[in-house]
Amino acid sequence: MRHRLVLALAAAVAVAATVGAAIAVDAAGRPARAAAPSAIAPLPLQLSGTGLYADGSMSVVRSGNVAFSPQYPLWSDGATKRRWINIPAGRSIDASNPDAFQFPPGTKLWKEFGHGRPIETRYIERLSDGSWRYATYVWNADGTEATLAPEDGIASVAAPTAPGGRYAIPSRNDCLACHEGQAVPVLGFSALQLSRDRDEQAPHAEPRRSGDADLADFVARGIIRNLPRSLLDDPPRIVAATPAGRAALGYMHANCGHCHNATGAVAGIELVLAQSAVDPAASAQATLDSLVGHASRFQMHGGGATARVVPGKASESVIAARMQSTNPLTRMPPLGVSVSDAEGIGAVERWIQQDLTPQPEITP
Amino acid sequence: MNRTPAGRRTRIAAPLVALMFAFAGAPDVAAAADAPKPRAQAPASADKVARGKYLVTVAGCNDCHTPWKMGARGPEPDMSRMLSGHPQDANLPPPPKLPEGPWVVTAAATNTAWSGPWGVSYTANLTPDPETGLGKWTQRNFTDTIRTGRHMGRGRQILPPMPIPMYKNFTDADLEAIFSYLQTIPAVSNRVPEPVAPAAAK
């Protein structure tokens, strides 16, 4: 009963959090609600109207929509995922800054989340005015169509293989919370994530499917232009002392770095978990500097961990405790998960335990 | 078992909070003039800061974000700790367990700690202290928080009794004025505890 009360209040708070009708952001990530929408068509009410599939099909992907898979996937309560991108003919992604791709107007991305069957397909589109808009489409049980979800999301839909048999459809504000947290709102499609030098130890690593394009493929097709040649000759790779460290940094990059980075919305927290394709040694060092021995502003109740990371002691590290927590007021990430990710947490804990050498105590 | 439906309790919560605001006396903002001088701030126009001070006053921010004390004329906000949130040294006992029925919320005497179906919430330090307040926040962080009801727009949910459902309707200009004013008030080092989830959510 009390749990239901909490859910009701949480729902009330979530409903209260919704703002505006058109959720689009400008190139700098600021809400662009006041932008005149007259020249921009409203979102299609059905997924079939977004151009993902061939005419008359809900399974055959339309020619020109290119599948890809990031080497470090975002973990979402164990949902399986498929992803596609479409760049309008005659346009391309400008990779002059390999850490912040510039996508042309007309860019579309889709990401299908499944638990035994497709549950939702999320959709991002860059509009002609340069703003971005976000939507998600919820599949019917038969898998014959997916319908635009309400802006407030859906607290719970049936998903038999999901934790608890339920699955939450995010609100559009939830979309913005993650996608607005870094310089470019597209996540998972970057030089590092598409690198041909894939990390086989990445938690939840997905085997590259037939037809999935990687960084070199996108360059070869002319979809990505202006990528420095050095990143084709020497594909991007996270810098770490060990394979376990590489996997842990990659996991945090994908699951935490969209908010916790050096330049985004919450840079003031001074926690840098995003890795760079351009200068991976510097970004890895920035991660270590912002974690190891760094006092945590978040203080656990009942004492315990007080530093973000204590070398060699995962149990005394706040980031591990918050990743393990299922308390919605404590857990990290705060969105998109309801249960802790044993594989991902294990990777981070092994890195803390085995790779990070405790600092020697200085005695007088 | 005579339990109150969850939906009804939710409906109860909003007017309850409004009622508490109605009873809360207007704080003596002028007393803040006796407080320590604020730290150096990025310049904001005097008009904007004055507008922000006005909005903070009439929106009742001091009712919960400034600890209350017993004064000569009864409970009053302790303006020496203006908007510094729940005192870190309050050391409160666990909230009382309420019997089933229409009473669902309790508040500490400071008016800075609240217990209800959402757990226990503590009001935030809104002063520009860099380590415990909003000193490292940006305007965007503040606006995103109020607009979304999430910490910095992307973290945990902001809990009752913070009236996000009303405050999210502030205009951007209002929120800029409020944040500009908050950045000029005296910084108070006060680390507010994290909220406590109800037992069912632990």
Image (cartoon, rainbow, N blue to C red):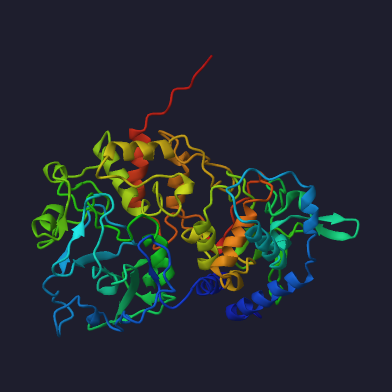
Q: Is residue A253 visible?
A: yes
Task: Give the mark count.
Answer: 0
Residue B46, compared with residue B1, is above or below; it is above
State the quadrant of the C terminus of chain A.
top right
Q: Is residue B141 left or right of residue A179?
A: right
Q: Is residue A170 visible?
A: no
* Percent coordinates x, y for residue B188 in the rendering: 68, 45
Residue A249, compared with residue B71, is above or below; it is above
Question: Considering depth in this image, is A268 or A313 the residue closer to the camera?
Answer: A268
The residue lying at 47 percent from left, 34 percent from top is: A293
The residue lying at 11 percent from left, 59 percent from top is: A222
Question: Considering depth in this image, is A187 or A116 the residue closer to the camera?
Answer: A187
Q: Is residue A350 left or right of residue A93?
A: right
* Percent coordinates x, y for residue A340 in the rendering: 40, 56
Residue A225, compared with residue A122, is above or below; it is above
State the quadrant of the N terminus of chain A.
bottom right
Q: Is residue A330 left or right of residue A148?
A: right
* Percent coordinates x, y for residue B131 in the rendering: 58, 43
* Percent coordinates x, y for residue A103 in the rendering: 25, 62
**Image quadrant assignment for residue B116:** bottom right
Residue A238, compared with residue B196, is above or below; it is above
Extreme top residue here? Answer: A364
Question: Considering depth in this image, is A65 or A296 the residue closer to the camera?
Answer: A65
The residue lying at 39 percent from left, 69 percent from top is: A164
